[in-house]
Amino acid sequence: MVLLRYILSVGLLVLLLACSDRAGQSIVYQNERGHFLLLDSVYLVGEELRIPFVHEGHLTRPSLLVSNSQTDLLIAAEADSSVFVLTENHSNRAGIVLLSLLGQSRLLDERSIAFRPRQANGLIDLFTGPNTVMAGTGAPIMTVAILRDEFGNPVSEGTLVEYTNTSAVGIGEFLDTTKHLCSYQKFYGGELRDKHFIAVASGNAHSRQNEYRVESAWPANLQIQLEEFFPFADSRQVLWISTQPIFDSFGNEMPDGTLVDFEVWQEESQIAAYVSKTVNGIAKVRIQNPSTSCLWSINASCRNAVQSNVLHLEFDAIVDKIAVQFQEDSCQFLIGPVSSSLGQVVPDGFPIELRFVSRDFEYYQDLELLGGYCSYKLPREQFQPDKDYDCEVISGGVKRIIRFEL
């Protein structure tokens, strides 16, 4: 019985001591206090920030929770230190940061601070568009500049931005301030064909040059003219036609590569079409002469916006007379002289065509004249004896017909 009383007494004492320890610990937690000693609410990004604090009522050191829109960072206080240290890596993002002083069991203090960006530094991102506008339209060219500090933060609202627009006319300078994290300017294409270079600067930050062009408007005039003309129906000759310099209504020369369409008409029918590209505002075309006498009309158009004048060209037959003989004993045709309307023989290499026809037979042969003459010996295997044939001798649009029999 005595032993039982002793055991109960000892157990009761242990229980009372345990309850006493828990109550004391609860009192210590409830008495834990702390707060920040920050004086400023705005700081510059990229600087080491020392955050002093006061902590009482508990031996365990508090912690600092740093929260922004992207990450959370927990920093423990060092022993015997009353300062949290935010290094450059912790403070290089501009914006609002929430600082929370965390005790052993509760939030002791909370403070919001802001990190403002530094001045613009490095390369400015510059965007320009469209890159080409037509003269005289007044179309706008939008340029947007995005400025950042050395840590990549957009610069503060109201940062001064200098624009430079350089062209053959001169240099234009414009000032703007950043709004909504960027700066923008509108430029307008004038009436003169030109190339413009845009650059932006702010403090130690600069952009690369951007470029836009003011190109010529629609062509306003188109005149064609003969540069070289041989007025005879000789298909070995060519005629050269060129445009006069082509300009728009503002006096701008059309750019190189502008397409000009040329059309050739004969007796109200289009017989040929050519396309040429301008060089220094002028387009040229080379056209082969016809092989027979005729009258041509030639005109041009550019971008379907303007029509040219019409050139009327008359080609005379270069051949006036053709002498032809047939030698029966040798079955050979002797052709020549073939003379022109001026009395001289046609040039060497002038083409001549022989056509041999009968009721159910056709045979062709192309030759060239040398000194106004040529000859051709009939291949007997192609012809039947005791049969009549017509030989048509054609050159320069002139035809001679000789009937013969083998």
Image (spheres, rainbow, N blue to C red):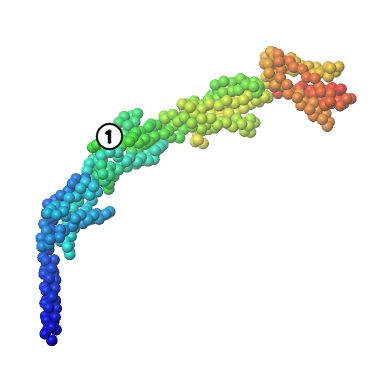
From the top left corner, tell me how far across and down residue 147 is, in percent.
28, 42
Q: Position of residue 250 (x, y in %)?
A: 41, 31
Residue drawn at x 61%, y 31% is 272
Is 165 situated above or below 19?
A: above
Relative to 312, 197 lies left or right: left
Q: Which residue sits furthest bottom? A: 1
Residue 216 falls in which quadrant of the image? top left
- Asked whether residue 197 appears in the rendered view, the answer is yes
In the image, what residue occupies the spot 65% across and 23% down? 235
Residue farthest along the right direction in this orientation: 386
Left or right: 390 as drawn, with respect to 141: right
User: Quarter holding the N terminus?
Assistant: bottom left
Q: Position of residue 200 (x, y in %)?
A: 29, 37
Q: Residue at x 68, y 24 (%)?
A: 292
Q: Give residue 208's quadrant in the image.
A: top left
**Label 1 SS:** strand
The front one of 96 and 170 is 96
Amino acid bearing label 1: Glu
For label 1, the residue is 173
Left or right for 282, reference 71: right
| Residue sitting nearer the eye, 224 or 259 | 259
Give the crowd class for mark 1: few <14, some 14-19, many >=20 residues within 10 Å. Answer: few
Q: Residue at x 21, y 46 (%)?
A: 88
Q: Is residue 376 above or below residue 43?
A: above
Taking 40 as reference, is 28 above or below it?
Answer: below
Asked if one can make out residue 116 in the rendered structure from this viewpoint, the answer is: no
Task: Please tell me whether residue 194 is drawn above or below residue 378 in the rendered image.
Answer: below
Closer to the camera, 88 or 244? 88
Q: In the rendering, at what x and y percent does residue 238 appear?
A: 60, 23
325 displayed left or right of 209: right
